[in-house]
Amino acid sequence: MPASLLIVDDDRDFTEAASDFARLRGFRPYVAHSLEQSRQFAHLPPVDLLLLDLELPDGSGLELLDDPSMPEHGQAIIVTGQPSVETAIQAVSRPVVDYLLKPLCPLQFDALLKQTAAARESLPSANLRHGMIGQCDAMCRVHDAIDRVATSDASVLISGASGTGKELVARAIHDASGRTGPFVAVNAGAVAPELLASHLFGHERGSFTGANHRHAGYFEQAHGGTLFLDEITEMPLALQVYLLRVLETGTVTRVGGTEAIATDVRVVAATNRDPHLAVEARTLREDLFYRLADYQIAMPELRERGHDIVLLARYFLDRLNARHGTSRRFAEGTDRILMRHAWPGNVRELHSTIQRGYLSSDGALVCVRPLSHRPRAMAMGGGAVGFNVGMSYAEIEQEMLLRTLAHYDNDRTRTALALGVSVRTIQNQLARLRNRENHST
Amino acid sequence: MNDVPVSEETRRWRHSLRNELNTITMATSTAASLLEHGGALDRVRQHLARAEAACQRCAELVRDWPDGG
């Protein structure tokens, strides 16, 4: 996989130019124009370089350096048009940070990219296939599926719990596809529903209040490449109809526009729900499902991946050692701890646990302490719910109620019928839940 | 570094000027890189148009020099 770069700057002209500059040098650029947009990249795998402006519309870029919701990053470079002694001191007191003044010299930027690419080359890459660690049977099936489907025109729907690596698979499909355009990722659940159409399909100037410029949407930006639509079941149904039309016709009409713009985009979609249940619950249109799911890939949960857990943990520690120039190793018994934990947050949780262990270790040994979780209901396919020993009756009742409600699309009458209680009982239970939540916050 | 205290207006002005210069530098350099790599001419033109627009904004900024700037 190519080296990656996250550019955080509110100047769109600069970010467009800097993205192309980096792309020409083999980098995969990501762009954010505000703190809020930057935090939406939390799901990204580690980025190799972070280019950060200080003056952003919603705060100082410095806030992002300590923000746990940012993706892990290698070197961070502050590039500011508003230099001050105060911010320089704040910046350079942090590890792996440089402080540069605008205008950014292209020769210097080029050197930075070369240095970052070289540092990446020296990172441990054993056991990597398609940019992922995974040798268990389930992951071998995922790798085989990527090989089979990448060069075809088939649409792909990836399903799996949060943190299992759906975007990595989408990225791997793009990398192996031979498509020369960019990989553009959008999380349908992270964009406000009223803005999603404009983000996806673009808008014309003056098409709504605040539309001061013509804007090319993600479909146009992904021309010649791949558009990854994550959390597809969170997309409003009305928009799903329009998405289906775009996929069928291969053309996009911007919001407020009339011109049909031809786009050559391969769409890879993903969901953390069972797609068939989502169709049944009417959060995913059946016709769109068939259009998106020529080929389906199911991601295994981390706890089902056996020894991969240990391989992944060692890989994360190797990366930390390489970045900080250390040679720490896991304390004795770590493999046992790793294999015993259920990892409900999957690879994302494992990564965070290793990072926490590394940062809290004083010497050469890293102790891994996964966070303890209360036993929770176990989601099962086919509309079934399983429960773990240790849950109270109240928790089981709550889980059953919420899952049945979700199954019937929040229809309280059908939920009451299914559970054999009155609608009033459902309403009372929901009110009690709300009260409990209010007291606990 | 801005060790000498300046007015807020001057501070904003310098910031805007640096941002425009940043766009010009990066857009022209990227256009040149695209030409070297045989990139799409449309993309080259887009970057040059960005640079030209930023040059015009620079011209406006140096016309409206702030007091004490």
Image (spheres, rainbow, N blue to C red):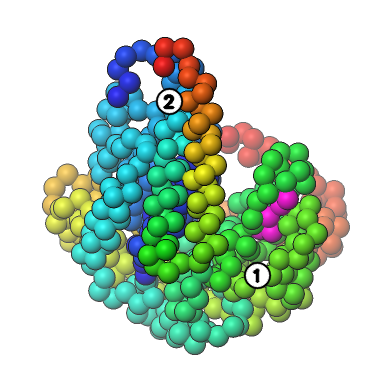
The residue under the point 77% across, 46% down is A207
Identify the amino acid type marked 2. Arg
Q: Nearer the viewer, residue A349 or A393?
A: A349
Q: Residues within 10 Å of mark 1 (few under 14, many from 20)?
A: some
Identify the amino acid type marked 1. Thr
User: How far from the left and from the top, in percent, is residue A224?
Assistant: 56, 71
For disc 1, the marked residue is A263
Badge 2 element: helix
Quadrant of image for the C terminus of chain A? top right
User: How far from the left and from the top, in percent, is residue A114?
Assistant: 26, 58
User: How far from the left and from the top, in percent, is residue A268?
Assistant: 58, 72
The residue under the point 78% across, 55% down is A257
Of badges 2 and 1, the one in the foreground is 2
User: How far from the left and from the top, in percent, is residue A31?
Assistant: 48, 51
Residue A395 lies left or right of residue B24; in this view the side is right
Q: Nearer the viewer, residue A112 or B38?
A: B38
Report the chain holding disc 1. Answer: A
Dividing the picture into quarters, in which one does residue A77 lie? Answer: top left
- The disc label shown at residue B14, or none: 2
